[in-house]
Each structure stands twice: as structure tokens, then as C-alpha cells.
Image (cartoon, rainbow, N blue to C red):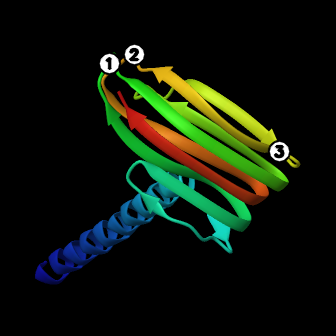
């Protein structure tokens, strides 16, 4: 009986290891998918990225580049921004803490813009400034401040 008892423990151990392996695999896949949605590819990138200012020049830019800004309801986000798009397109947007887009502009190949946006923020929390490249070549810059 002692031999079969040990055999049962061995099977339980193997099943636990197998089930644990699946759990680890599923967690790894979930993390990969979560990070995949927020990653971008930027080849030939150059330019500063400091609090309140980002300036990127690139040969190829694809995917969402995100900066997070903490703000209080009632504050105004002022953005001086520009973009030159030689190929592809760029979407620029501001997303509130609930994930809703509160401001957006899209620039296609041939665009060369310099503008200012004033966005009155309605809630407390972390806003996202997103520049989403679609096989783009060119540059973008954003200077922002909260008032």
C-alpha cells in the first residue's frame, strides 16, 4: 500500500506542476498582450523627451506613443503642438482618466502644422497625451502645461 500511496502523490505533484505551468503561460500571454497595446516602433528616432516637452523626428513611426499627465478637475491643459508628416499619418489625442478621447486631430502625408489647443479638464486623474503613428515619417512636437 505504501508504494501506491507514493505513486498517487507523484501524480498529484505532476498535475500541480502541469496546472501551474498553464497558469504561468496564461499570465505571460496576458502581460504580453497588455504591453503590446501600448508599444510603438520608432526607427531613426531623435529628439528630447522631458516633462512638459517632447520632440521626435523619425524615419518610421508606428503605434501609440503616450505621455501621462496628472491633473485636477477645472484645470486647463494648454498644448502648443506641431507635426510634419512626410509619409503615413499621425493621430494626436488627449484621453481622460475614464479612457474617453476629449481632443483629437489627425494629420496625413503632406501635413505641416503648428497650433495651440486649450482643453478644459473635467475630472481629477491621469490624462494621456497620445501620438499614434501609422507607418509615418516626419516629426512631431508637443509643449504642454496645466493652468
Q: Which residue is mark 2?
A: 122
Q: Position of residue 50 (x, y in %)?
A: 41, 58
Measured in 3D between alpha carbons, the distance from the residue under mark 2 to the one under mark 3, in whole angstroms, is 31 Å
Q: Position of residue 104 (x, y in %)?
A: 64, 29
Question: Who is closer to the viewer here, 94 or 21?
Answer: 94
Residue 137 picture quarter: bottom right
Measured in 3D between alpha carbons, the distance from the residue under mark 1 to the one under mark 3, in whole angstroms, is 33 Å
Q: Earlier in the sequence, mark 1 or mark 3?
A: 1
Question: Who is closer to the viewer here, 33 or 129?
Answer: 129
Residue 56: give its label.
Answer: none
| Rendered-image quadrant of the C terminus | top left
Q: Earlier in the sequence, mark 2 or mark 3?
A: 3
Q: Are marks 2 and 1 in contact (CB under 8 Å)?
A: yes
Does 79 sit left or right of 88 as displayed? left
Measured in 3D between alpha carbons, the distance from the residue under mark 2 to the one under mark 1, in whole angstroms, is 5 Å
Residue at screen point 78% across, 40% down: 107
Q: Which residue is mark 1?
A: 73
Instruction: Inspect this view and state whether residue 29 appears.
Output: yes
Amino acid at each position: 500500500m505504501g508504494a501506491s500511496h507514493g505513486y498517487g502523490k507523484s501524480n498529484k505533484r505532476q498535475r500541480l506542476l502541469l496546472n501551474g505551468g498553464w497558469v504561468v503561460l496564461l499570465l505571460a500571454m496576458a502581460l504580453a498582450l497588455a504591453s503590446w497595446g501600448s508599444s510603438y516602433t520608432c526607427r531613426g528616432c531623435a529628439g528630447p523627451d522631458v516633462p512638459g516637452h517632447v520632440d521626435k523626428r523619425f524615419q518610421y513611426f508606428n503605434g501609440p506613443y503616450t505621455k501621462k499627465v496628472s491633473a485636477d478637475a477645472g484645470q486647463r491643459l494648454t498644448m502648443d503642438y506641431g507635426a510634419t508628416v512626410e509619409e503615413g499619418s499621425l493621430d494626436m489625442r488627449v484621453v481622460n482618466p475614464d479612457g474617453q478621447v476629449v481632443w483629437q486631430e489627425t494629420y496625413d502625408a503632406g501635413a505641416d502644422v503648428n497650433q495651440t489647443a486649450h482643453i478644459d479638464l473635467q475630472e481629477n486623474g491621469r490624462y494621456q497625451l497620445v501620438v499614434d503613428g501609422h507607418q509615418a515619417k516626419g516629426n512631431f512636437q508637443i509643449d504642454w502645461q496645466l493652468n
